[in-house]
Image (spheres, rainbow, N blue to C red):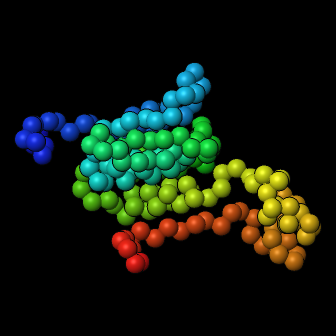
Amino acid sequence: MMTSVLGQSHTPPAFSLALLKDRMASFVGDASQPSRTALELPRYTKLQRQQVRALAAVFGLEPRACGRVGQTLFKTKRAGPLTAAGEAQAQRLLACSITYGRPTAQLAQEMQAAMNQRTTLTTPIAETNKGSQMLRQMGWSQGMGLGVRGQGIMEPVPVALKHNRHGLGH
């Protein structure tokens, strides 16, 4: 039992990442209501919010804090059912999920991996994209590696987001 800012006592919501995974899966796969673009969640602790953000990244959802309500997950263009790699990532997050305390090294690593997965491309670039057209003119085709001999990298370059610098001027 906790006391809120207004002096009212309330019980914090039970946190189960497995139940949230099921809610996100049904939200993303709900074709009967295509106009439903937001999933509202209750207020959670900081650690729980971090885990929710990591799981939302696996599903391609964008989390936003919306006032006093809690977190709201919005559908993006990349939102969709989990792939095999996404399902494996979600299972790893569920396996090391904790409800309170400090994140373990394994949990921190899995959350970082899930957030990095959000920044990589999940769908190929369109054929009409300028970069794709330029690469094709230079002789590249899908499935080939980059470079003169075609032995370079084949997967997209992950974008590493640094969260250690906050505020203006950094």
As displayed, is residue 51 above or below residue 104? above
In front here: 87 or 75? Answer: 75
* Left or right of 113 in this view: 136: right
Q: What residue is at 33 percent from the left and 60 percent from the top?
A: 104
Q: Is residue 25 visible?
A: no
Quadrant holding the C terminus:
bottom left
As displayed, is residue 87 above or below residue 154? above
In front here: 58 or 77? Answer: 77
As displayed, is residue 64 above or below residue 8? below
Q: What residue is at 14 percent from the left and 36 percent from the top?
A: 10
* Left or right of 109 in this view: 47: left
Q: Where in the figure is residue 144, as x and y percent of width and height?
A: 84, 64
Q: What residue is at 51 percent from the left and 44 percent from the top?
A: 61
Q: Where in the figure is residue 11, as x and y percent of width and height?
A: 16, 36
Residue most extreme to the top: 32
Residue most extreme to the front: 168
Q: Where in the figure is residue 159, as x and y percent of width and height?
A: 58, 66
Q: What residue is at 85 percent from the left and 66 percent from the top?
A: 135
Quadrant holding the N terminus:
top left
Q: Where in the figure is residue 99, as x and y percent of width and height?
A: 28, 47
In front here: 130 or 125? Answer: 130
Q: Is residue 64 visible?
A: yes
As displayed, is residue 8 above or below residue 168? above
